[in-house]
Image (spheres, helix red, strand yellow):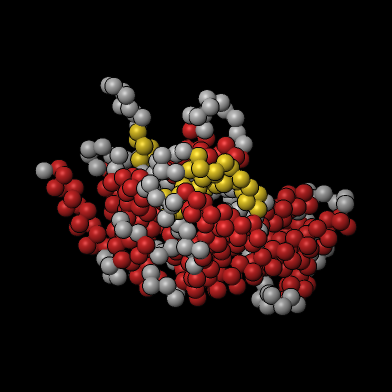
Amino acid sequence: MNCTQNRKIEQVTDQTLVIGMDIAKQKHYASMVDARGRVLKKPFPVIQSRSGFEQFYASIQEAMKEFGKTEVIVGIEPTGHYWLNLAYFLEEKGIPLVMVNPMHVKRSKELDDNLPTKHDAKDALVIAKLVKDGRFSYPRILHEVEAELRAGSTFRESLTKELNAVQNQMIRWLDRYFPEFVQVFPSFGKMALVVLEKTPFPMDIANQTVEGLMERYRQSERLKCPQKPKVQKLLEVARHSIGITEGQQMARIEIATLVRRYRQLEQEIATLTEELTALAQTTAEYEWLQTIPGLGDATIIELLSEIGSFAQYQDPRQLIKLAGLTLKENSSGQHKGQKRISKRGRKRLRALLFRVMMPLIRHNEAFRQLHEYYTTRPINPLRKKQSIVVLCGKLLKVLYAVCVKQQAFDGERMIQDIFSQFQAQAA
């Protein structure tokens, strides 16, 4: 058992009232036990409302007085976003909140009655007993800029998904009515959208001249200088199109609606990104993160929204664990299992690190050299994907170092430090 686990166990003393809560959308359930796991109060409901929370707080005060407790700790099993309201309420009241892993709850609920029964009251008691054993983690309740970045980044992700969905609908529309369109416009740029707005069907283009089409597109406020070679190619493919000619009245309404929504989403995402960039620039970390070649504003925003302030971490290994990049191994006896990442952490952060690493390998000389070394070293060379996983961990350590020490990124120093460690290990 590690020291961190010991500290968690020591936090629960004979003077501690331990409360486990099963979280739901409208009604939570709470159960109170002592430091030895003895039930002090049977599970009872807590309504998700101001009055419900106040009654819950009053129940805590009464129980502490009745059972002679001077401290209290509340443990929850996080369920979506429903726990956030309670978390901020408990923080206002000065009551510490901890979290237990849902998988631990699932695997330990049969210990008392040897039954796989599941209900809210039982789960609340299981959670309370996990907390008294120190099997919990500490949630980070976000405030001010961190809360703004998290909310804004999450919303931008949802807008981006919606934009991709609209784009897929437009592609499906083109596959039916104008499949040759992608030969001229492989992506939905400014001119492609104007063409879909003004002349969505091949029949709208086939009988026109290049000059006539250019003049028509030029009338759009969004496109003052249409590209003549593209117009010529568009005219050519339209005259030989195999697009469907039936149902065009409704199809015209459909594509017009999709183009408007696509533009609207693009504008909303751009505006939101500007707001998020301005917020990120007010953080202490922004100045140092932008010194790392290959990290743009969009990446910095997402990193800060997922990680928050680096000052709140004591060691970069906490960030590696947060991202689910810690290694796991299944070995027994003489069998030596393969090591893989645990994937127990923030999925969005892990996905972000993978997306960031590809341009970093291309544009950051230090990371490019490390990638080449890991994949070509004579002893235990890594596959490309394995190397990327290792470099994601290295990146977190670099981010932590430049932000905590408040020093600009130095690629040469990073390479020297790492290769000196390799030489020392080899010796």
Q: Residue at (64%, 62%) from the top-left corner? A: 50
Q: x and y percent of residue 51 in the render?
A: 65, 60
Q: x and y percent of residue 308 in the render?
A: 43, 63
Q: x and y percent of residue 258 in the render?
A: 75, 60
Q: Is residue 147 above or below residue 7?
A: below
Q: Residue at (35%, 52%) from the top-left corner? A: 318
The residue most toward the top is 334
Q: Residue at (30%, 39%) from the top-left corner? A: 1
Residue 185's image quarter?
bottom right
Residue 336's image quarter?
top left
Q: Residue at (35%, 70%) from the top-left corner? A: 288
Q: Tell me if 177 is positioned left or right of 31 in this view.
A: right
Q: Tell me if 276 is positioned left or right of 207 in this view.
A: left
In this view, the residue in front, 313 or 273, is 313
Q: Is residue 346 above or below residue 121?
A: below
Q: Is residue 314 visible?
A: yes
In this view, the residue in front, 122 or 231, is 122
